[in-house]
């Protein structure tokens, strides 16, 4: 957070704020634009997360993701050749922020049933179709063809539009993101967001009792790994996060209620069984 403020203050008079880079660069540029009110131009060089497309500005305060304000790019420039020049695994990781629809929709439905939260079945259906569209485009994303990158970019746009209609990120953010944020708060390290979300989507799906096969098949076809070693997460760290996530979600009232809010904390033997499953299926 301090580094965002420093950056915002260090700007001289300028006609625009340009954000060039990955997800964290996008959030930094959104933050400076929000503070300085200059027009915002975002040029993502990788699509490892949906940060260039979303309104919310995510900054980390003491390792904890906090949404401080909102900013939408005045111009969003997507160049497929620029994206392809980056590491392929980073662009493939972007799928994580669409795959999260798989578990976010289940959370939304459960929150509706348990708490009477507003639920729009048309919007949920549209989000499901976005996910299905991405799953069907695995082959294009595997080669990072123009079609594959366009599909990913347009999926982000579609997801943001649906979120705007609901007024929050319900259609695409739920317990999988909660677990990812809990992991970040424990490790105090940056991760490739989409990759971490992919891993957490698998875990949340398993806990929700959903069959994660479509997600696993997609990751396989795209040749994208979200094994904890690839994500950069040790077994101990993942174990700690799974034991603490129930407590974590309750400590942050800004999180929309999801799977971990509705269940007692995971027991140690449940966590061990989950870890064994995760290491096996992501191998
Ligand atoms: Zn995300």
Image: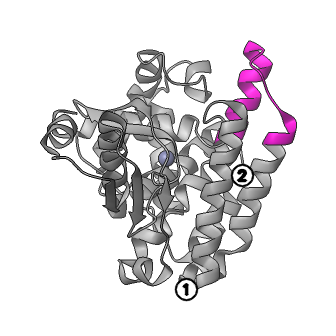
Q: Is residue 169 left or right of residue 48?
A: right
Which one is nearer the viewer's eye here, 150 or 95?
150
Of the numbered discs in the image, which one, if any, rests on residue 143? 1
Q: Position of residue 94 (x, y in %)?
A: 50, 62
Q: Is mark 1 within 8 Å of ligand 1?
A: no
Please tell me which residue is depicted at 66% across the width and 50% down the height of the picture.
159
Quarter that holds the N terminus: top left
Categorize mark 2 by other alpha carbons within 10 Å: few (<14), some (14-19), many (20+): few
Which one is nearer the viewer's eye here, 157 or 36?
36
Please tell me which residue is depicted at 44% across the width and 58% down the height of the picture.
195
Circle 2 sits on which residue?
211
Prevailing secondary structure class for the magenta stretch in the rendered image: helix
Q: Is residue 93 left or right of residue 135?
A: left
Helix, strand or loop at mark 1: helix
Please tell me which residue is depicted at 74% across the width and 18% down the height of the picture.
117
Quarter of the figure with residue 30 = top left
**C-alpha gap between disc 1 and disc 2:** 26 Å
Visible residue check, residue 226: yes
Of the residues under marks 1 and 2, which one precedes in the sequence?
A: 1
Which one is nearer the viewer's eye here, 211 or 93?
93
Q: Position of residue 103 (x, y in %)?
A: 65, 43
Query: Magenta residues?
Result: 104-123
């Amino acid at each position: 957070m301090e580094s965002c403020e420093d950056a915002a203050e260090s700007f001289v008079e300028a006609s625009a704020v340009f954000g060039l880079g990955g997800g964290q660069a996008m959030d930094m540029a959104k933050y400076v634009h929000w503070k300085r009110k200059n027009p915002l131009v975002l040029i993502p060089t990788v699509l490892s997360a949906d940060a260039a497309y979303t309104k919310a500005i995510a900054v980390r305060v003491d390792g904890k993701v906090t949404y401080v304000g909102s900013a939408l790019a005045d111009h969003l420039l997507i160049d497929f050749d620029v994206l392809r020049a980056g590491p392929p695994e980073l662009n493939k990781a972007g799928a994580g922020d669409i795959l999260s629809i798989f578990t976010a929709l289940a959370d939304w439905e459960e929150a509706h049933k348990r708490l009477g939260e507003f639920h729009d079945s048309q919007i949920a259906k549209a989000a499901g179709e976005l996910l299905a569209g991405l799953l069907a485009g695995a082959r294009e994303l595997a080669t990072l063809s123009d079609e594959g990158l366009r599909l990913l970019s347009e999926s982000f746009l579609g997801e943001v539009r649906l979120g705007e209609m609901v007024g929050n990120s319900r259609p695409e953010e739920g317990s999988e993101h909660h677990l990812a944020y809990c992991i970040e708060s424990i490790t105090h390290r940056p991760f490739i967001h989409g990759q971490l979300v992919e891993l957490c989507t698998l875990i949340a799906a398993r806990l929700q009792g959903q069959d994660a096969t479509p997600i696993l098949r997609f990751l396989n076809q795209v040749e994208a790994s979200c094994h904890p070693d690839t994500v950069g997460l040790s077994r101990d760290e993942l174990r700690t996060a799974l034991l603490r996530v129930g407590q974590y979600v309750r400590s942050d009232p800004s999180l929309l209620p999801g799977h971990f809010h509705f269940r007692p904390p995971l027991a140690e033997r449940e966590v061990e069984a989950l870890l064994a499953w995760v290491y096996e299926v992501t191998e």
